[in-house]
Image (cartoon, helix red, strand yellow):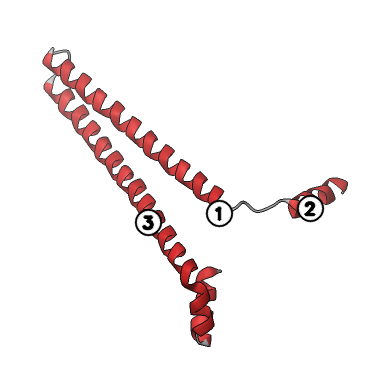
Amino acid sequence: MALIIKFRKQRKLKKTQPWSSVRRRRKKLMVRSRLRWKLVMTLLVQQQYRLLNMRLSEDIDQETFARKHTELRDRLASIKLQLDVVDRCYDETAELASKVFELSQTLRNQWLTAEYAAKRRILEIVF
């Protein structure tokens, strides 16, 4: 029982993180994700080169080469798609941050001159 009370007290005392640290952490995660996908893509290209060299030295037959080459090509296309998703996510986050900043610069004036419905919409956006 004492452990539960201690945990509740710790939870109440815990401060929320400032937005800047949340943004930094999110950016760091996106950069790591992009680097991870780039590394996997590099490894797949290296595998394609090794496969081609094996075919040129006639270590593998044409059928095996064609099957493996198609498999690697499909995996590479999938990874390029994942990289595009990560890039798009980063761009959308940057655009959203820009819009939030613009809103924060004009919010006071908008709030003072807005009607009830507009104030309600602003509150819905912010919270």
CA distance for labels 1 and 3 = 17 Å
Name which residue type carries label 1.
Trp
Does the image show residue 121? no
Return the residue at label 2. Answer: 8
Q: Indicate the quadrant containing the C terminus: top left, top right, bottom left or bottom right.
A: bottom right
Query: Which comes sooner in the sequence, label 2 or label 3?
Result: 2
Of residues 19 and 8, the one nearer the viewer is: 19
Residue 19: give its label.
1
Image coordinates for residue 114, horizontal then vertical, percent:
50, 84
Residue at x 32% of width, y 43% of height: 83
The answer to whether the residues at label 2 and label 3 have Cβ atoms under 8 Å apart is no
Q: Is residue 126 left or right of residue 3?
A: left
Residue at x 46% of width, y 62% of height: 101
Q: Is residue 8 above or below residue 30?
A: below
CA distance for labels 2 and 3 = 37 Å
Q: Alpha-carbon neighbours of circle 1 within 10 Å: few (<14), some, or many (≥20)? A: few
Residue 115: give its label.
none
Q: Is residue 8 above or below residue 45?
A: below
Query: Which comes sooner in the sequence, label 2 or label 1?
Result: 2
Look at the numbered disc 2 and give the secondary structure of its residue.
helix
Return the residue at label 3. Answer: 92
Image coordinates for residue 17, horizontal then vertical, percent:
62, 51
Residue at x 41% of width, y 60% of height: 98
Does the image show residue 38? yes
